[in-house]
Image (cartoon, helix red, strand yellow):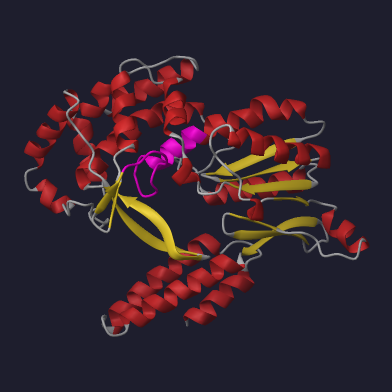
Amino acid sequence: MRTDRTRIGEKACKDSKLVFTSLYHHVTAIGNLQDCYEALDRNKAVGVDGVTKEQYGENLEGNLQDLSSRLKRMGYIPQPKRRAYVPKPGSDKGRPLGISCFEDKIVESAVARVLEQIYEVDFDDSSYGYRPKRSQHQCLDKLGRTIQQNPVNYVAEADIRGFFDNVNHDWMLKFLKHRVGDPRIIQLVNRMLKGGIMEDGLVTASEEGTPQGSILSPLLSNIYLHYALDIWFSRRFMKQCKGEAYYFRFADDYLACFQYKQDAQNFMNQMKARLKGFHLEVAEEKTQCIEFGRFARENARQRGQKPKEFTFLGFTHYCGKSKKGYSKVKRRTSRKKLNLSINKFRDWARRSRSALRKGEMLRQARIRVAGHLNYYAITDNSEKCNTYMHHVT
């Protein structure tokens, strides 16, 4: 099956306008479904039916045969997703997640593996989120180098209000049909989108949105924003710019860098109108256009002001200087993310004191600290990392 899926990517690469009319057999293949089963984490939360990976695997061959049969005759109906919440800064209730049943996770993974072969070829280099061999650190590194090595003087950052909750299903399916001509794939994705959410025992129909927590949602969100934003910027907006322009996106977080202020302002105006056409709205309180770059620090001081900063992927970016006195983009952990990390560790420690033995608690604490530092321990951020370590200790 792996070889067959690779051929999909090869064909997609050779012909950027090719519409794939026969993909569904890759999804229903027993070998593909079994690969997806084996790849799923046994420790993930369960869905509304409460079935775990171990329970599903007790009769794995029979379950997969039955699943494949239902998929082939289009008799497979996804179950509603279980609503759960994780802590979110500025929200008392938290960030909503949709937890799929284990069998639904297998199907979501199978569909994602097939579609990924097509869209990994199509996606722009400006997109970094939820893609193989791409990470936040790569995006941050490219952003820093771009600002330092190119005539960047302005940064426009924006935030989409409740993106995952407001993805329009009709537009989503239209975007898929640009490359997917197999109606069974389209119908299956449509069923997944409209599977509903169960919260407090009640099932609510899904008329819009793609729930965070679903295996397929990251890919669908990338496809949606690829057509709504990425190719609009690279193929249309950049041609209007008088100076240089650069664009970076990680999932629904994105920003653009410009040489001239007028280009940055035009981007803000046209981008809002563009998103509105796809049923998305910009969060004005998190959207701004600032002077930023090699000359921003000195220009701000001449005006008697502090140089502006922006936050992207958990880091506050600010204009600094290297040891040799050259302009340098520096980063530190954003105040919101640092407070959230410290509070999460404190809450965990309080719960664990009476539940875990000292040795086990220290082992888990070490894992949590390593996870934080693996992401935030970068150049110029030692002060904030030391602050985190002080509170943890």
Indicate left or right for 295 with 351 as reference: right
Q: Is residue 13 above or below residue 208?
A: above
The one nearer the camera, 155 or 128, is: 155
Q: Residue furthest right?
A: 302
**Snapshot quadrant of residue 384:** bottom right
Indicate left or right for 327 with 272 as reference: right
Q: Say whether residue 198 is visible.
A: yes
The one nearer the camera, 287 or 196, is: 196
Q: Say whether residue 124 is visible.
A: no
As for residue 221 lying within the magenta part, the answer is yes
**Snapshot quadrant of residue 150:** top right
As for residue 38 lying within the magenta part, the answer is no
x and y percentages locating residue 157 in the rendered image: 67, 48
Q: Which residues are magenta?
A: 205-224
The residue at the point 61 percent across, 60 percent down is 315
Quadrant holding the N terminus:
top left
The residue at the point 29 percent across, 33 percent down is 191
Q: How many marks?
A: 0
x and y percentages locating residue 245 in the rendered image: 73, 36
The residue at the point 47 percent across, 26 percent down is 175
x and y percentages locating residue 167 in the rendered image: 46, 39
The one nearer the camera, 256 or 270, is: 270
Q: Is residue 384 above or below residue 390?
A: above
x and y percentages locating residue 60 in the rendered image: 10, 42
Indicate left or right for 235 with 129 as reference: right
Dominant secondary structure of the residues highlighted in magenta in the image: loop
Q: Is residue 20 above or below residue 43?
A: above
